[in-house]
Image (cartoon, grey):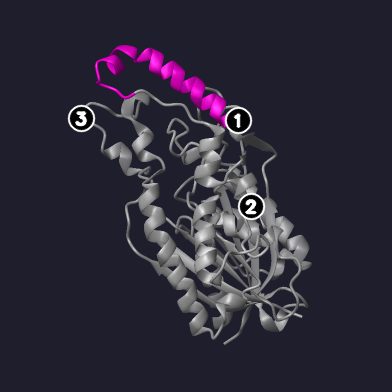
């Protein structure tokens, strides 16, 4: 069996960013308008008053200070509260494929080899903009790659599931190199009118190249082991899909703004997620480390899913057996927010300096499903 190596990573960051102050101003303006429009129903106890958001609330709850987005204007417009992303023609490169291609080009440049040496493309993300043709096949064509390509969705754990899948392809000899991309436009499935979650997500795309050890050059990262876990939970859910149309009432043929689509977007029960996911992920990491005969206290660095700073801090404590130093438990969500599958890869891409050959780190994701993935890596000479 051929060992797999992470040889390069890439990142595409949108040009536009929204600060907490800007997001709060937009939400509060919308909430004030909604309260005024529904004053009588609120006074009668039929509706609840929308309470204002605040920068202090957001940062305490999540650690997030800003987020990059593909379109800022629509999100901070109190009359819209939704990004403006015009549809593209079928003969144009779709927006998610474009993001993925840019991240892939960044990774291929760092790799230093032609894209033609890649044998497979995996697009692993929490939301695809269409069911088919696969985003991965569109990326494959745009980059001039032969072989095969497919999409996969395991929510926030899509990237680690993608790395595992790519490493298995390499180990079996199916291909010599795999490109795994994670384009995420999380702003499009977020309800910006929900005070409890309007601040959570941002947009980004990442890419990882995994190849066989016998063709890998110097540097990069040996994949020491991968492990995946799922456990069904409704505590994080997105009900948007093609069957929504089939559920419309008799006589109604198309969705309307009054259909209440908020229940078809991202929703979560945050307290339950925190209580259930932190121990699940911590135990998974420790068990996997033991299986690989690795001392978890000796990990050089952890690149965890960037969902919530409080979750990451507690997981870091449980794994290391002490308070992690900032350089040991990488946090990038302050500027990027939660970017679903891409979060741990952004952290890995931006903060992998200072490693000597033999040093070990952990890429870990967790999220809706529940799903979780661990990838232990060791710096190569």
Give the position of the C terminus as an image quadrant: bottom right
Note whether 103 is above or below 203 in the view shown: below
- For mark 1, what is the residue? 21
Q: CA distance from mark 3 to mark 1?
A: 44 Å
Dot 1 falls on a residue whose secondary structure is: helix
Q: CA distance from mark 2 to mark 3?
A: 48 Å
Residue at figure coordinates x 34%, y 51% from the top left: 235
Discs 2, 3 touching: Cβ within 8 Å: no
Q: Look at mark 2 in the image and give the residue it sits on.
A: 332
Q: Which mark is residue 379?
A: none
- In the displayed orientation, state which residue is furthest to the front: 322
- Asked whether the viewer can see residue 174, the reply is no
Mark closest to the chain's N terminus, 2 or 3: 3
266 with respect to 93 (left or right): left
Magenta region, residue range? 22-48
Residue bearing the label numbered 3: 250
């Amino acid at each position: 069996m051929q060992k797999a190596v992470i040889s390069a990573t890439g990142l595409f960051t949108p040009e536009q960013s929204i600060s907490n102050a800007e997001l709060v101003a937009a939400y509060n303006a919308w909430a004030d308008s909604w309260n005024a429009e529904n004053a009588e129903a609120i006074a009668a106890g039929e509706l609840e008053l929308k309470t204002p958001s605040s920068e202090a609330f957001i940062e305490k709850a999540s650690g997030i200070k800003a987020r990059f987005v593909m379109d800022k204007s629509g999100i901070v417009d109190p009359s819209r509260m939704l990004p403006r992303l015009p549809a593209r023609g079928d003969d144009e490169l779709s927006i998610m494929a474009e993001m993925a291609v840019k991240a892939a080009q960044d990774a291929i440049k760092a790799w230093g080899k032609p894209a033609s040496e890649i044998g497979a493309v995996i697009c692993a993300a929490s939301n695809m903009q269409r069911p088919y043709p696969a985003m991965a096949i569109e990326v494959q064509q745009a980059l001039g790659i032969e072989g095969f390509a497919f999409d996969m969705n395991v929510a926030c754990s899509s990237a680690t599931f993608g790395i595992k899948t790519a490493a298995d392809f390499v180990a079996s000899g199916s291909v010599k190199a795999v490109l795994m991309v994670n384009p995420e436009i999380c702003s499009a499935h977020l309800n910006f009118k929900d005070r409890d979650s309007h601040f959570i997500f941002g947009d980004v795309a990442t890419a990882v190249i995994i190849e066989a050890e016998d063709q890998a050059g110097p540097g990069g990262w040996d994949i020491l082991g991968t492990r995946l876990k799922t456990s069904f939970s409704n505590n994080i859910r997105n009900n948007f899909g093609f069957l929504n149309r089939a559920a419309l009432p008799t006589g109604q043929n198309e969705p309307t703004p009054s259909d209440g689509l908020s229940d078809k977007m991202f929703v979560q029960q945050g307290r339950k997620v925190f209580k259930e996911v932190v121990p699940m992920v911590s135990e998974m990491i420790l068990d996997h480390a033991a299986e690989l005969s690795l001392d978890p206290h000796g990990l050089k660095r952890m690149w965890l899913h960037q969902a919530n700073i409080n979750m990451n801090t507690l997981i870091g404590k449980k794994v290391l057996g002490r308070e992690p130093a900032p350089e040991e438990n990488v946090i990038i969500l302050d500027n990027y927010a939660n970017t679903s599958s891409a979060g741990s890869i952004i952290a890995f891409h931006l903060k992998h300096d200072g490693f000597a050959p033999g040093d070990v780190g952990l890429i870990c994701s967790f999220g809706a499903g529940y799903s979780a993935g661990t990838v232990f890596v060791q710096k190569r000479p």
